[in-house]
Amino acid sequence: MSKQISSVWAREPRPTRTPGRSREEIVRATLDLLDTEGLDGLSMRKLGARLGSGATTIYWYVENKDELLELAYDHVWGEIALPVPEDLGWRDTITTFAHSMRRVMLFHPWIGSLIGRMPALGPNALSMSDRLRRTFALAGFEGLDIDCANATLTAYVFGTVMPEIAWRSYLSGEQLDQESMRETFEKVAKDFPDLLERVIEVNEKVSDTDTLRETSFAFGLATVLDGLEARLRS
Amino acid sequence: MSKQISSVWAREPRPTRTPGRSREEIVRATLDLLDTEGLDGLSMRKLGARLGSGATTIYWYVENKDELLELAYDHVWGEIALPVPEDLGWRDTITTFAHSMRRVMLFHPWIGSLIGRMPALGPNALSMSDRLRRTFALAGFEGLDIDCANATLTAYVFGTVMPEIAWRSYLSGEQLDQESMRETFEKVAKDFPDLLERVIEVNEKVSDTDTLRETSFAFGLATVLDGLEARLRS
DNA sequence: ACGACTCTCGCACACTGTGCGAGGGGATTT
DNA sequence: AAATCCCCTCGCACAGTGTGCGAGAGTCGT
């Protein structure tokens, strides 16, 4: 009775005397594989090959593939830069944090398929949460509002970046020229003239899609922060 | 040359004279299977069995499994209630929309694994976008700001609901009592005393997790809307 | 009656995660 | 020095996956 949550983080890791391989090594290889071949490209056999070992060897260090993903997942959160709020002030701290988070997520697109699948319980994720909470506390939030502010902010970043990831992976799948993209949109959105017109207009006016997306991200971020600030004053 | 985006929506569907099966039937069965068994529970063979047909029959109506998922994906967006903004005013319209979106997503948790994987190009998704744009236009936004407001709002909903889905599926995996959950948290978050204290406190004070999550959602939503409204006035 | 077209499906292939159990090799005990 | 133990590796096998192929059944227009 009293079942544990099944998560790498809820188990003690293998005591690791002086083994040939290590968890760190495996996680590093996993990240490599994920970054170059994506989530579908990660298989135990390929990972074993990359480590110069049999596939099932990995199961000595890790209970199953999901645990491996949990490990990789948490590693990513460790890459996000979160300045000390006491120096910068909360708004700038959060802003640079949010941009860093976006950048990191776009660099590891496979993260998009994990967010909806497993909760973030690893040390890096928790540390991030902790420092975000401190930042919001310093800003003046109290009690449950701290967590709500925290949730709102990360929700915005997640929600913006994930469709962005989807689009990027979709478009990079085949190299598409401007022309064929317009054709596709015209076919797909033929029943929504307003939307279609807008998309075409934007696509023609804006040559650099990346900066457009970044501006849009900044807009939304500022909006959310404005909202939080307003809530702070009342 | 001139490759098309590979998407169901960019292809003409099969002309369908008077067939035994139909796309609608297949999509319906797919949704059934997804809702009851989740994304991992969906396989072509199981789907075939449910339809009383061979697995490969499905490939007559659909190019591959991803297209099937696109179809199911878009169907979900069709379930979201979006009132006519002219009646309710933009803020209430958006609010009820956001809550409805959340409810629908929680009802089809597998959607969480698709948002980061494929862009929403189907008619229902586009129609949703279209009406949201109309709503924001009616609120007074202009030009690109309409799209930014739109993006910000949906980002918030996505980003809130997806981790929520992750948690729910995680916790429902094994039936966990209060006690073992506390144990797990203590093990996992032992290096973050602030965080731990907060989690335990909340867990003890709040008996009903569902309403807590809903309140938190409403908080963030109000924040975002406040931010948008502020942006509107300047 | 004949061909053409629409639709179904069994088989096969390459690939997946992972349980099992046989071993190798170094450390520890006798 | 020998025996025992335990950490670690890995080949094999199993059940399951998506899907290409090609043979067939059924229906329609001529």
Image (cartoon, coloured by chain):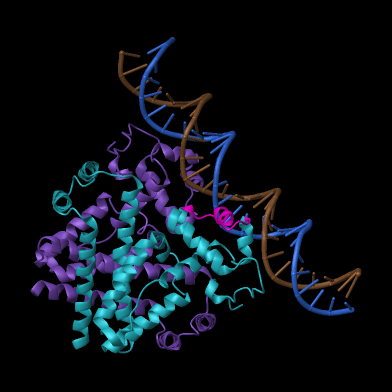
Chain colours: A cyan, B purple, C blue, D brown
At which x and y percent is residue B31?
Answer: 40, 53
At which x and y percent is residue B200?
Answer: 45, 86
Question: Does D23 sit left or right of C2 as displayed?
Answer: right
Q: Is residue B139 visible?
A: yes
Question: Does B29 sit left or right of B3 as displayed?
Answer: right
Q: Residue at x 31, y 38 (%)?
A: B13
Task: Residue A44: say if magenta.
Answer: yes
Q: Residue at x 30, y 72 (%)?
A: A98
Q: Residue at x 14, y 64 (%)?
A: B145
Foreground pick, A37 / A222: A37
Q: Is residue B102 visible?
A: no
Quarter of the rendering occupied by the N terminus of chain B: top left
Which quadrant would residue B108 be assigned to in this image?
Answer: bottom left
Question: Does A1 sit left or right of B69 as displayed?
Answer: right
Foreground pick, A195 / B213: A195
Which quadrant would residue C24 be assigned to in this image?
Answer: bottom right
Vertical position of residue C11 compared to residue D30: above or below: below
Span colored in magenta: A41-54
Vertical position of residue B54 compared to residue B96: above or below: above
